[in-house]
Image (cartoon, rainbow, N blue to C red):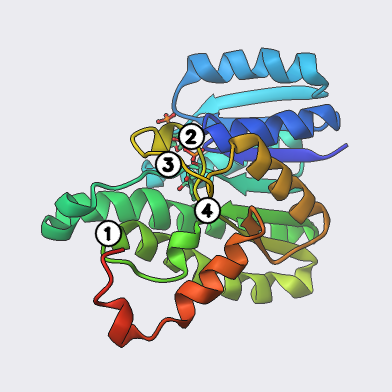
Amino acid sequence: MKNILIIGANSAIAKSVSRLYAEEHCRLYLLARNVEELALQKTDLEIRGASEVDFATFDVNNFGAHDAIIDQVLDSLGSIDLAILCHGSLPDQALCAENFAAALQEFNTNALSVISLLTSLANHMSIQRNGCIAVITSVAGDRGRQSNYIYGAAKGMVSLYLQGLRGRLYPNGIHVVDIRPGFVDTPMTKAFKKGALWASPEQVAQCIVTGIRKKKHTIYAPWFWRIIMMIVCSVPEAIFKRVKL
Ligand SMILES: NC(=O)c1ccc[n+]([C@@H]2O[C@H](COP(=O)([O-])OP(=O)(O)OC[C@H]3O[C@@H](n4cnc5c(N)ncnc54)[C@H](OP(=O)(O)O)[C@@H]3O)[C@@H](O)[C@H]2O)c1
């Protein structure tokens, strides 16, 4: 039986991931803002096979509460075998480009809250000397694009942080996974026109669970985004800066 902590548990991708782990009879602890949705998820996940589901309401931007919430989770689960960080927000790029207060709010949600939670989780898991930490970043973090560089910079910061954290925690037996989805049809992207490159949250969740089981370091979800991003990253900057992307 695995003890799994899911942060940002009401996200569409997180819900699909939780369902897959419920079918494996795991014990889940869910953290998110909307408590009614969490209560509904608890019932659903227990019906699907979860051995136990606990939850607590949590705003990731309440940085002062981070250590206490991880302590609370550990009091309940005893140990954390797997922590998955799923929360995120899609910034208003035009607003954030001209308004630093708005940009800071997005960096808090998409980067600094993640780094704060990872600090607390890494400290606890180092003592445990086993476990896995997985974070949903994005392919947007692979290269800064003029249309969404606030989001991309935040996700890219987390990806770089994870690379270093992976090395730090490796001697302690803790595995660190960077999950980089491409376009996923979720509430976050409801305003976007969908096309051939779009995946469902269920497809991405399957990539996540399989990748974690295989101890991948970086999971592109779906896999073809690895190739797309290799191509995108290979375009010379002198050309890339002229492309309206
Ligand atoms: N959809 C895509 O195309 C795509 C692509 C690449 C990466 N991602 C990443 O995938 C992850 C999951 O997103 P999703 O696509 O599943 O979208 P989603 O369903 O809109 O989920 C985003 C979640 O983040 C939570 N959140 C935002 N701010 C929060 C805060 N201050 N405290 C606590 N929770 C907060 C939201 O909580 P509330 O429900 O309370 O608002 C929401 O549940 C995110 O990290 C996102 O950046 C998504």
Residue at position x 60%, y 41% from top? Answer: 71
Q: Residues within 10 Å of mark 4 (few under 14, many from 20)?
A: many
Cα distance in 3D space between marks 2 and 1: 19 Å
Cα distance in 3D space between marks 2 and 4: 12 Å
Question: In the image, what residue type sits under mark 1?
Answer: Ser
**In the picture shown, does residue 76 fall above or below 125?**
above
* Label 2 CB-ligand 1 distance < 8 A: yes
The spot of residue 114 in percent (x, y) is 48, 53
* Label 4 CB-ligand 1 distance < 8 A: yes
Q: Which residue is mark 1?
A: 147
Residue at position x 76%, y 33% from top? Answer: 20
Q: Which is nearer the eye, 176 or 98?
A: 98
Cα distance in 3D space between marks 3 and 4: 23 Å
Helix, strand, or loop for circle 3? Answer: loop
Question: In the image, what residue type sits under mark 4?
Answer: Gly
Q: Quadrant of the C terminus?
A: bottom left
Helix, strand, or loop for circle 1? Answer: loop
Residue at position x 74%, y 35% from top? Answer: 77
Q: Earlier in the sequence, mark 1 or mark 4?
A: 1
Cα distance in 3D space between marks 3 and 2: 20 Å
Q: Which is nearer the eye, 171 or 68?
A: 171
* Label 3 CB-ligand 1 distance < 8 A: yes
Q: In front: mark 3 or mark 4?
A: 4
> Is residue 8 toward the left or the right of residue 236 in the image?
right
* Visible residue check, residue 27: no
